[in-house]
Image (cartoon, rainbow, N blue to C red):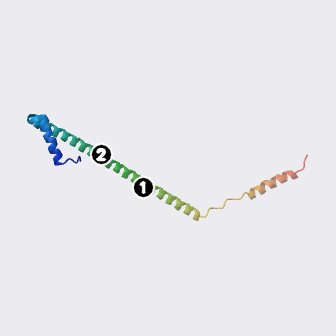
Amino acid sequence: MFDIGFSELLLVGIVALVVLGPDRLPGAVRTAGLWIGRIKRSFSAIKAEVEREIGADEIRRQLHNEQILELEREMKAMKESLNASISTNAETPTPAEPTHATDTRTSTSTSTSQDKSPQP
């Protein structure tokens, strides 16, 4: 991670021994170890949280995709049923609508008979 080799660690240890002295060095190493442990645990907790969120996002994405696919299937089924009902309606002969020619003749003859009546 930090790319620290053995020679660098040895140099840091010698400097710490000279600066702190042999009496306080074990306590300082213990404290540094505790802090490093806490930092590692924090990083691992953050990493686990991020992985859980990524997994949750993936699950949400999959559920969304499944919902979209289900809606597409429903649309396709509705389209097929509409096409089937349209094709059955096209095959069934529709009754011919009555023409209004007879009604027109009747109304015309009535109006002409009124026109031929003598005027007073």
Coordinates of residue 118 in the picture (x, y in percent): 90, 50
Q: Which mark is residue 69?
A: 1
Q: Which mark is residue 19?
A: none
Which quadrant would residue 40 be assigned to in this image?
A: top left
Residue sitting farthest toward the left: 23
- Which quadrant of the structure image shows residue 28? top left
Q: Is residue 17 left or right of residue 76?
A: left
Q: Amino acid at mark 2?
A: Val
Q: Give the class, few, some or many, for how many residues have Cα within 10 Å of label 1's Cα (few <14, many ≥20).
A: few
For image coordinates 75% across by 58% down, the residue present is: 102
Of the pair 1 and 117, the residue shown nearer to us: 1
Whole-percent x, y for residue 74 in the image: 45, 55
Residue 113 relative to residue 102: left or right: right
18 versus 59 height, above or below? above
Judging by the rendered image, the residue that carries numbered circle 2 is: 50
Label 2: state its secondary structure: helix
Q: Residue at x 13, y 34 (%)?
A: 20
Number of numbered labels in the structure image: 2
